Amino acid sequence: MKGIKVFIKYIFLAGISVIFLFPFAWMFLGAFKSNNEIWQTPYRLLPSHLDLGEFLANLKAIKLYGYLLNSFIVGIAGTALILVVSSMFAYAVVFLRNRNMDRIFVVVMVTYMLPGAVTYVPSYVILAHLGLLNTLSGLIFSNLANVFAVFYFRQAFRKTSMEFVEAAKIDGANHRLILRHVILPLNKSAFSSVGLLTFIQLYNSYMWPSIMLTSQDKYLISQGLRQFFIQEGAYGMNWAQVMLASTITTLPILVILFAAQKWLMSAISQDSGVKL
């Protein structure tokens, strides 16, 4: 009886996986089809023939690689800085044992309830005064205040035994060394999961970059994909290129998720017992 239940569970999970994977398979295989074949009925998932020459021509025609590079610059640099800033703030809240720090943390958490659109106008004004509008550095700077990362790190750091911290202080370590050599090694899963989620957020960001970035050469991949859709009537005309562009946009995230699933699942299993 137990074996039957396990078999049914795996069949159910396999069916759910197929449902979620179908759009990606449809998008990827559509890059090898012609417009007529994409819209033909009855629908066929596999292309009738593989024309690698046409595929390579479409790959060359899609000029998204500059946008992709911008997204990686913002994603990698922004994620690294957010991890540093958020972990330092969370360390201060947890280990400095100051009543004012707890009050500051409450104020920070209250801002988490504000809609993101509310911050667009003041952020735009601040960047304008700093001369950082229409720059990737300004986009990175405006995303440094990440409340989710602060909250996540605080919850993870609270599980760290104070014995390790006190032992490091006895050995003469300052706060920077404690954070680097004690807190970081004990919370690798927290850093990896926050880093992964932050990178995906920055990589997929669309609304705020569309407001503060005006030069096309500084667009992120989400803006570049929209630009590709509307320029020269590409949208609705060459669907093979549309499918290929969408695949190129999505593929890096899928590869990163697949490569980091071990650390992500480890973080989820450890966080299941976090005391809020």
Image: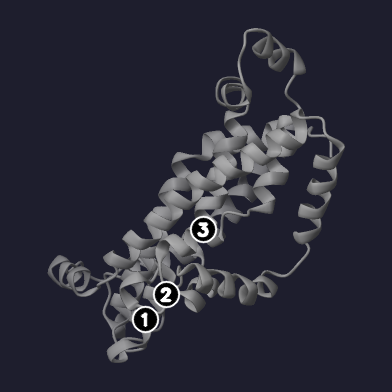
Q: Left of 221 or right of it: where is 127? A: right
The residue under label 2 is: 223
Residue linked to disc 1 = 227
C-alpha gap between disc 1 and disc 2: 6 Å
Pointer 3 residue: 141
Ranked by sequence position, the earlier of labels 2 and 3 is 3
Which amino acid, by three-letter code, is at mark 2? Gln
Compared with 253, 189 (above or below) is above
Q: Residue at x 63, y 7 (%)?
A: 171
Q: CA distance from mark 3 to mark 1?
A: 25 Å
Give the farthest residue toward the front: 129
Q: Is residue 36 left or right of residue 201?
A: left
Q: Please name the amino acid that badge 3 sits on.
A: Phe
Please say if 234 is above or below 265. below
Label 1 residue SS: helix
Q: Amino acid at mark 1?
A: Gln
- Figure quadrant of the N terminus: top right
* Number of disc labels: 3
Q: Secondary structure at mark 3?
A: helix
Q: Residues within 10 Å of mark 3 (few under 14, many from 20)?
A: some
Q: Is residue 194 above or below residue 223?
A: above
- In the depicted view, which residue is nearer to us: 199 or 248? 199
Q: Residue furthest left?
A: 53
Q: 133 or 74, which lies in front?
A: 133
Label 2 sits on a secondary structure element that is helix
